[in-house]
Image (spheres, rainbow, N blue to C red):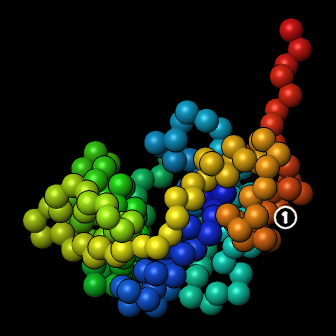
Amino acid sequence: SFDPIHTGHLILAERALDFAGLDRVLFIPTAKPPHKTERALSPFEQRCRMVELAIEGNERFGLSLVEGGGDSSYTWQSVMRFAADGYGRDRLYLLVGSDSLAEMAGWRRPDVIFEHATIVAMRREGTGRGAPVPAGAAVIFIETCATSISSSAIRALVAEGRSIRYLVPSAVERYIRQQRLYAARAPEAP
């Protein structure tokens, strides 16, 4: 959902470009992720703006609004949209963490994802490969050097008034501060 996008996302995308031989990486914020109902997300437009700020200057990174509708979006639907545009498994790669790969069996229509996309699974050194890969699926595992940066930890730091320098690109940090995203909410009066 990129709430917010952080340097870990950028590091992983750059590693995928290099190690999987990709031409371009598209960042796809989801307007309404079906698996993130436990908290309110920042508005879609603000999350897209943070992605734009973060990828500015890297011509091999782009923003896609394919999941920008108001309804819940599912990965299999996005994969099918790209497949309809002529991207086959030899040209369509889905970047996920190895933890997401391990959970994909529980996603909606994982068969469609595995049939139409090559999965690029990022794993940290020393971690396992996750769940077994279905027969016929194309999966590339890439070791990462990224640290354990998470969007939820960044939101918590902002709410506490702490520094997020180097966790997000400086333009994203400025935007978060200007828009007062993730700031602690004052308790409601009784």
Outermost front residue: 126
Quarter holding the C terminus?
Answer: top right
* Secondary structure beneath label 1: helix
- The residue at the point 40 percent across, 62 percent down is 97
Depth check, front residue: 111 or 177: 177
Whether residue 3 appears in this view of the structure is no
Mark 1 surroundings: few (<14), some (14-19) or many (≥20) residues within 10 A: some
Tell me which residue sits at (74%, 58%) in the image: 164
Under mark 1, the amino acid is Arg
Q: Position of residue 135 (x, y in %)?
A: 10, 65
Left or right of 70: which side holds 86?
left
Give the left or right position of residue 151, taking residue 24 as reference. Answer: right
The relative height of residue 42 versus residue 129 in the rendered view (above or below) is above
Residue 74 visible: yes
Q: Position of residue 157 (x, y in %)?
A: 72, 47
Q: Residue furthest top?
A: 190
Q: Quadrant of residue 189?
A: top right
Identify the residue at image location x=54%, y=36%: 37
Q: Is residue 175 above or below residue 154?
A: below
The residue located at (32%, 64%) in the rendering is 126
On the image, which quarter does residue 68 sit in? Answer: bottom right
**Position in image of residue 12 (x %, y %):** 49, 73
Residue hosting label 1 = 174
Quarter of the figure with the N terminus:
bottom right
Instruction: Name the spot of residue 125 as percent of width and height, x first.
Output: 36, 68
The front one of 10 and 93 is 10
